[in-house]
Amino acid sequence: MLFVSLDQAYKFFADDDGNGKCSVQLLAKDGIYLSKMPRSIDAVHLASGNRADLAVSCQCETYPCVVTVKAEEEGTNNGVIGMKEAFSLKIKETLGVSSTPILPETSVRRPCYVADMSRAVPDRFHQMEFQHLAGDRHVIYWDGHDHEMTVQSTQEHKAAGSSHHPFIDHWEVGTLHEIHANGQMKHPGHFHVNPFQIASVLQENNSETNLKADNYFQAGDFHDTIFIPTMKLGYESLVLRMQADRHVGKMALHCHFLAHEDDGMMAYIDIQGKQGTVCKQAKELQPSCYEDAFEPMTK
């Protein structure tokens, strides 16, 4: 599933009312496989730009039947919350099949830039907050400093002789960063270039676990866009880890509600150093990860 919108986020789930019933298994999020898959989930949470790879199994009491997938709006720019029918699945009987196949749990070899860094030692720690201020101001706070990137501010910097908007930070390529994020219950945070791993997430309905009630968000998962409407307020509620892997230059981050981005909720991080430098901890912690083109492991 790929979800595209200007200012919406939805929770998708199969409505079991009626003759049919479906179970959903999660394989990947934002194009990155889970460390162990499949994972049984009750709902799919997608903000603008999110993707999910799913395996769906449906059964009917009597064939054929129709299962409706509903979409519950979880957060919007216009403040309108509601539920709608997203699409329907028409289920037909396959003759000769007597049982539903069970998908075995499996793991895949991963490139080192998405190695599990949960046991790694970060090189630097950061605080990040997306915040809506008075009027239409939308600001990113990074390590205590506020930052707005609008058309007007960009033009002002160019008029002053700058070739680009000021960076909010400077990273060395090949380093690991831990980001304590706040505000992602209202603003989907999106990073370009490098994906990030959830180190921990605290929900409103579970005081100390890192597991969402419907099983969708878990520590260890990778994303490039994160939006969790039920996360608690505060910098300890969502902790992310990101490798500054190989690429040097500008790395953009912004709110994926585009009106918020246009109102200032966008910034650059400058990644410096030698192009191609990788984080050494990745290979040390996960020796099976690969740094070049994929090659199957031989026994």
Image: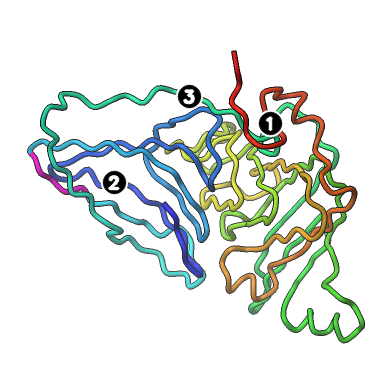
Residue picked out by circle 2: 14
In the rendered view, would you say 289 is above or below 3?
Answer: above
The residue that appears at 64% across and 43% down in the rendered structure is: 237
Residue 162: percent from the left, percent from the top? 89, 77
> What's the image's color scheme?
rainbow
Amino acid carrying label 3: it is Thr
Determine the image quadrant of residue 73: bottom left
Marked residue nearer the N-terminal end (3 or 1)? 3
Residue 201: percent from the left, percent from the top? 60, 40
Residue 13 included in the magenta stretch of the image? no
The residue that appears at 75% across and 58% down in the rendered structure is: 251
What's the CA distance linking mark 3 and mark 1?
Answer: 18 Å
Residue 52: percent from the left, percent from the top? 46, 47
Residue picked out by circle 1: 290
Magenta residues, as a range? 63-67
**Neighbourhood count class around disc 2 (C-alpha, 10 Å): few under 14, some 14–19, many 20 upward:** many
Amino acid carrying label 2: it is Ala
